[in-house]
Image (tube, grey):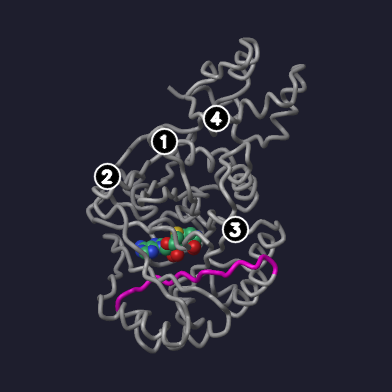
Amino acid sequence: MSEPAHKRLLTDLGRGELAEWCGLRGEAPFRADQIRRWIFGKRVADFEEMHDLSKPLRAALAEDFRLFASEIVRHQIASDRTEKLLLRLEDGSHIECVLMREPDRRTVCLSTQVGCAMGCVFCASGLLGLKRNLSVGEILEQVLRLDRLLGADERITNVVVMGIGEPLANIKSLLPAMETLNEKGGLGLGARRITISSVGLPEKIRELARYGKPFNLAVSLHAPNDELRNRLVPVNERIGIAAILEATDDYFRDTGRRVTFEYVLLGGLNDGVEHARELANLLAGRGAHVNLIPMNAISELPYADPSHARTAAFVDILTEAGIAATVRKRKGADIDAACGQLRLAEEQGSTSSQTTHELSDAVVPNR
Ligand code: SAH
C-alpha cells in the first residue's frame, strides 16, 4: 500500500533541508545523517526500522513524509541477470529503471522524465511525448528500488542516466539527485562512476560543466551532418551539430573529462562507410570516444539493426582515423530492456511487448 500523497517524499529533500526539518523539531542536525544512512546505506523499508532514532522522531517522520513514491508493477529478470523494474508513480505515470550486472560492477540505468520531448525517431521513450519531469526523489527512488534487489554483500558501482527522458531538460532535479548519489552520506559513488547521456543541449552542457563535478558526459550524436541528424533527432533543427561540439569542447576543457559520443547504428540509414568517414573528420582532434549502439528493433518503428559486417567496417574506419570506438554490449536481451519499451506497452494497454530487445551497458569504463 502506498501512503497518502499529501506527505512529502523524503528523498526530495537534500541533506540541508532534512537537517533543517530536524532542527525545527528540536533534534540535532546530525539526525539527518542517521536518517539518510538508513535510507541509502541500510535499505530500510519503513521508518520503524530506524532503530537509533527515538520513537517520537520516527513517528514525526512518518507523519510528515513518505519513504517511497512508487509501486513496482513489473519486475523482469533476464537470463544474463539484468533486472528491470516498471514503477508506477502516484499520478499513475510509469517509469523504467534497470540493473545490469558484470563480474566487477553493478550498473543502474535511470529515467529522468515521464516520456520525452526530443522526438528521436528510433526511440520508444518519446512516442507518447513528454508528460512531466521527475522530482529529485523520484529519480533517487529508482536507485533505492534497484539497490534493494542486490544481495547483502553487493553494492551499486555505476550509474548511467540513459533511461526515459532527456536528463539535461530536467537539470533542476538531475543535479540534486546526482549530488546525493555522489555524497558520502548518500550513496557515496564517485562522480566518475556517473554518466549522464544527453541529446546535446549546449547551454545545459555548460551549466553541467559549471557545476564542477567530473561526471561523464555522453552525447547522442547519431549522425555526422545536420541534414541527417535533423531527420533522426528532430530537436537538432534548433541546435545544430556545430553548437553541440563547441559545448562539448568546453566541457572537456573545463572538467578534464573526455566526452563520449553515442551513435545508434540504424541499418541502411547512418551506418555506411561514408558516414563513418564523415564522423571521423568531425571528431578528429577532439579526443572523443565513440560508442556505437546497434539499433534495438522496436515493433512500432520501421528501423532495422545494422549487419555485423557494416558495424565492423564502421569501427575500423574510426579506429584507423585514431578515434577510440567501441560497440555497446547488449544486456537483458530477453526482457525488453531497452528504455521506454515496457512503459510504452503498459500505457498502450498491452500486457507484453512483442519484440525482444537489448539494453545498453555503461558507455564509459571506470577511469
Ligand atoms: N535523452 C538522452 C537519454 C536517452 S537513452 C539522450 O538522448 O542521450 C540513451 C541512448 O539510447 C541514447 O543515445 C538514445 O538515442 C539511445 N536509444 C534510444 N532508442 C534506442 C533504440 N531503439 N536502439 C538503440 N539505442 C537507442
The label nearer to you, 3 versus 2, is 3
Q: Which residues are magenta?
A: 254-267
Residue 18 to residue 211: above or below: above
Which type of secondary structure does the marked residue at label 2 adopt? loop
Q: CA distance from mark 2 to mark 1?
A: 37 Å
Q: Residue 120: where, in percent of width, then height?
A: 44, 66
Q: CA distance from mark 4 to mark 1?
A: 17 Å
Q: Find residue 39 and name its label.
A: 4
Q: Earlier in the sequence, mark 3 or mark 4?
A: 4
Task: Read off the residue under disc 3.
Answer: 215
Q: Residue 171: where, in percent of width, then height?
A: 63, 53
Answer yes or no: do the residues labelled 3 and 4 have beta carbons within 8 Å? no
Q: Is mark 1 within 8 Å of ligand 1?
A: no
Q: CA distance from mark 2 to mark 4?
A: 34 Å
- Tag 3: amino acid: Phe
Q: Earlier in the sequence, mark 4 or mark 1?
A: 4
